[in-house]
Amino acid sequence: MLAGMTVTTSCRGGQAPAAPPHKWKGRKDSKVKRWDVITIGNLSRNRYWGESDAKAVRAAICTCTLITGDGFRLLVDPSLADAAEMAGELDRRAGIKPRDVTGIFLTHEHGDHFAGVAHFPNARWLAAPAVAEILNRSARLPRRFENATDRLFDAIDMIATPGHTNTHHSLRFDCDGLSVVAAGDAVATRDFFRERRGYFNAVNVELSARTMDTLATTADIIVPGHDNYFLADGIV
Ligand SMILES: [Zn+2]
């Protein structure tokens, strides 16, 4: 059957040149054992879906990520205001209970990124000092946020990612040899990253773009604020 057929190795029909092996940016020796997206977020309006920036057409939900390692389960940007829904997603995506979460980290002070913060009785509340100050000053929440240090649990780097807000911070960690950035709203979605475009409410769009340039050099995988995760190198 195969006699006479030409076997080709590229879609152009010729012999593809051997590509150099991809060099991942992450380290294999990491105290992060796994990471799981708990909720995949969405925007209230998405210009890449043909929607106007002028008004919300749906409720925003942020992407919420669980980072698990030796002695910690850190939940980034708890997204769901309803306690049962938040617990349900945590069970469905990671098989754990709210009481198993040992820490919460907020990337910034926008309400959709801490809607579910109150549902974790054993969690420390962590944020970059400038973010913690804003949250604590607002007195919108029943507990105070602790100042996060630049390196959490000897495993996770907190990195300044300004532009969406002035004090926005993301988390970068290594897992399975990959460098992963839980970006929060420093990156709204994959489409916004591709065009280095800040979301409509960014305080500084130029700075937003530069922050995304920096993340492109730092991350193999980006977990954006309102979308599923993606390969940073795949779209630059
Ligand atoms: Zn935001």
Image (tube, rainbow, N blue to C red):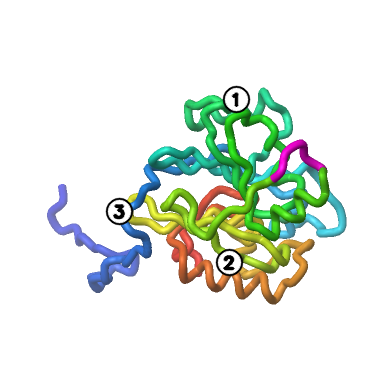
Residue 56 in picture, x, y percent from top left: 83, 49
Identity, as a three-letter code, of the amino acid under mark 2:
Arg
Q: In terms of secondary structure, what is the magenta stretch mainly? A: loop
Q: Count how many numbered circles sit on residues in the image.
A: 3
Q: Residue at x 73, y 52 (%)?
A: 109
Decide whether residue 232 is among the magenta residues.
no
Q: Nearer the viewer, residue 21 or 34?
A: 34
Q: Residues within 10 Å of mark 3 (few under 14, many from 20)?
A: few
Q: Residues within 10 Å of mark 1 (few under 14, many from 20)?
A: some
Residue 34 in picture, x, y percent from top left: 40, 42
Residue bearing the label numbered 3: 29
Q: Quadrant of ligand 1?
A: bottom right
Q: Secondary structure at mark 3?
A: loop
Which quarter of the figure has residue 128?
Answer: bottom right
Q: Residue at x 25, y 63 (%)?
A: 9
| Most distant residue in the right direction | 54
Residue 188 in picture, x, y percent from top left: 65, 57
Q: Which callout, 1 or 3, points at the residue further toward the start of the chain? A: 3
Q: Residue at x 32, y 67 (%)?
A: 23
Which quarter of the figure has residue 103?
Answer: top right
Residue bearing the label numbered 1: 88
Identity, as a three-letter code, of the amino acid under mark 3:
Asp
Q: Is residue 51 left or right of residue 160?
A: right
Q: Residue at x 67, y 39 (%)?
A: 79
Q: Nearer the viewer, residue 83 or 155?
A: 155
CB under 8 Å between discs 2 and 1: no
Using the numbered discs, state the Cα–Cα distance from disc 2 to disc 3 in whole angstroms.
30 Å
Q: Which callout, 2 or 3, points at the residue further toward the start of the chain? A: 3
Nearest to viewer (mark 2 / mark 3):
3
Q: Residues within 10 Å of mark 2 (few under 14, many from 20)?
A: some
